[in-house]
Amino acid sequence: IFAGDRSKEFRARMLGESYTAGGIAHTVEKTRAASDQTLRNNAQSLLNEAYLSGTTTIEIKSGYGLTVNDERRSLEIAQSFTDETTFLGAHVVPVEYKKNPKDYVDLVTGSMLEAVTPFSKWIDVFCDKGAFSVDDARTILKAGMAKGLLPRLHANQLQEGQGVRLGVELDAASVDHVSHLSEKDIEALSTSKTVATLLPGAEFSTRSAYPDVRPLLEASITVALASDCNPGSSYTTNMPFIIAVAVREMHFSPEQALWSATMGGAKALRREDIGHLFEGARANFSILNSDSYIHLAYRPGVNLVEQVWRDGLQIK
């Protein structure tokens, strides 16, 4: 849930220019200033895009309000669209707390958590360089778990660290990004139920090095693919595009990418009723206008989705 646009930041990044307009802080400012209706309309527009390109289940996070009221209203809006709502108050430390980050951790684990719990299923932390330490992430996630929220993490996007192993320690459903993994990280994931969710849109949009999925698959780790739709580092809702980039740049086979975008995503939400078709599952599926599912990667940028069905109802 967010407001605003960071296209100027994207342009500067692509041209190799420095850009100091604020990054996440810019989106936080715009989100705080936006009306509930503006936030709702933006979310609905993005959801419509996602549905038209074949998505049937979506997780929506907060994380651009970073005040008690703005995180609460973000999640209340999110809950009107999906059951998969994630409290990401620990996205970054907002500017007003930069000199006292521990006070912000106290806020997140105190009155903010209290306010958002009725509207949240998951709790997430950005555990990486420039965001939250492993110790703070553990504190925040355990506070959420004590309230009945389920843990997940952003981890190891920018550098190797202990975030992935923290996710395994806490039985997180998913660790997202995982662009920089050590042998210890891979070993930990291989003995857990935690899903490694790769987000190729982030590497594409930031011109960063793509992680190689092969070490994860060789270790029999469950891998998911997701859009990471956000205005700063991956402003796309298009999962066929994500599949194409994963095949082209991350060494997925078309079959592996399709599985990771469907069943892998379901496992990252700890869901068994979606992501595949069987008796008793939700009738969520897409029909392609193509000779083969391989065309999702073979014909990047082409919308091959002819029909979309969600809970047994045709929505496209």
Image (cartoon, rainbow, N blue to C red):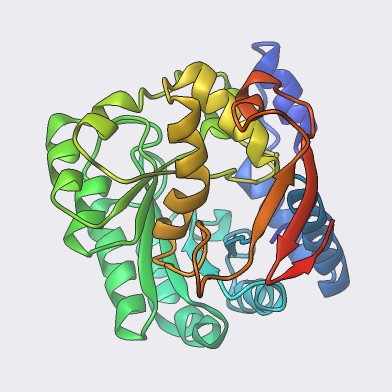
Q: Is residue 162 left or right of residue 274?
A: left
The image quadrant that residue 213 belongs to is: top left
Q: Where residue 256 appears, x then y in whole percent?
A: 43, 34
Q: Is residue 49 left or right of residue 233?
A: right
Please, is residue 4 above or below residue 315 in the view? Answer: above
Q: Where residue 309 appears, x then y in whole percent?
A: 73, 61
Quadrant holding the N terminus: bottom right
Q: Where residue 155 appears, x then y in whole percent?
A: 35, 45
The image quadrant that residue 149 belongs to is: bottom left
One can see residue 186 in this view: yes
Q: What residue is shown at x 41% (from left), y 82% (from top)?
A: 110
Q: What residue is shown at x 61% (from left), y 24% (from top)?
A: 297
Please, is residue 49 above or below residue 291 in the view? Answer: below
The image quadrant that residue 129 belongs to is: top left
Front-most of residues 250 and 67:
250
Front-most of residues 142 and 248:
248
Front-most of residues 19 and 238:
238
Please, is residue 77 above or below residue 51 in the view? Answer: below
